[in-house]
Image: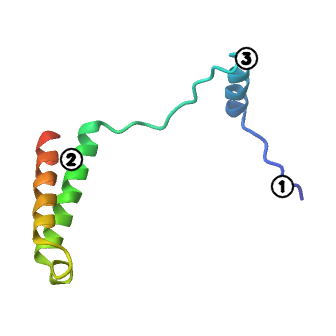
Amino acid sequence: MSSVISPTPLQSQKTHACADSGGDCVAEMAPVFESGLLARQTGQLLTTLGYMFVYLPAFNAHISRHTGELLIAIGKNLTEAAR
């Protein structure tokens, strides 16, 4: 049994088109997320981490309360800015 992987016709066409362009080939990129969505989700994550650091005993014994409050403030600002 052979383990040779052959490209699909679409992959062959992309390779051929890039070779014909003289090396200046722009590859297709994965879909780019909107910056608002990324900012909102990052804000939510930071807010959640901040609340964990402030209110959960496992964290607040080792991490400064100020650190948690700072994360909450930054997270809220990012979440509001994304709306």
- Looking at the image, which residue is at 89% across and 59% down? 1
Give the alpha-carbon distance from disc 1 to disc 2, as whole Å. 45 Å
Residue 82 position (above or below residue 25): below
- Residue located beneath label 3 in the image: 20
- Looking at the image, which residue is at 78% across and 47% down? 5
Question: Could you tell me if the residues under marks 3 and 1 are in contact, i.e. CB atoms within 8 Å?
Answer: no
Disc marking residue 3: 1
* Disc 3: CA contacts within 10 A as few (<14), some (14-19) or many (>=20): few
Q: Which one is earlier in the sequence, the residue at label 3 or at label 2?
A: 3
Taking the image as shown, residue 4 lies to the left or right of residue 14, namely right
Image position, residue 17 (x, y; %): 69, 21
- Residue located beneath label 2 in the image: 40
Secondary structure of the residue carrying numbered label 3? helix
Q: Which marked residue is nearer to the observer: mark 3 or mark 1?
A: 3
Taking the image as shown, residue 56 lies to the left or right of residue 10, namely left
Taking the image as shown, residue 74 lies to the left or right of residue 32, namely left
The image quadrant that residue 27 belongs to is top right
Mark 3: which amino acid?
Answer: Asp
Question: Could you tell me if the residues under marks 3 and 2 are in contact, i.e. CB atoms within 8 Å?
Answer: no
Give the alpha-carbon distance from disc 3 to disc 2, as whole Å. 42 Å
- Looking at the image, which residue is at 79% across and 42% down? 6
Secondary structure of the residue carrying numbered label 1? loop
Mark 2: which amino acid?
Answer: Arg
Q: Which one is earlier in the sequence, the residue at label 1 or at label 2?
A: 1
Q: Is residue 83 visible?
A: no
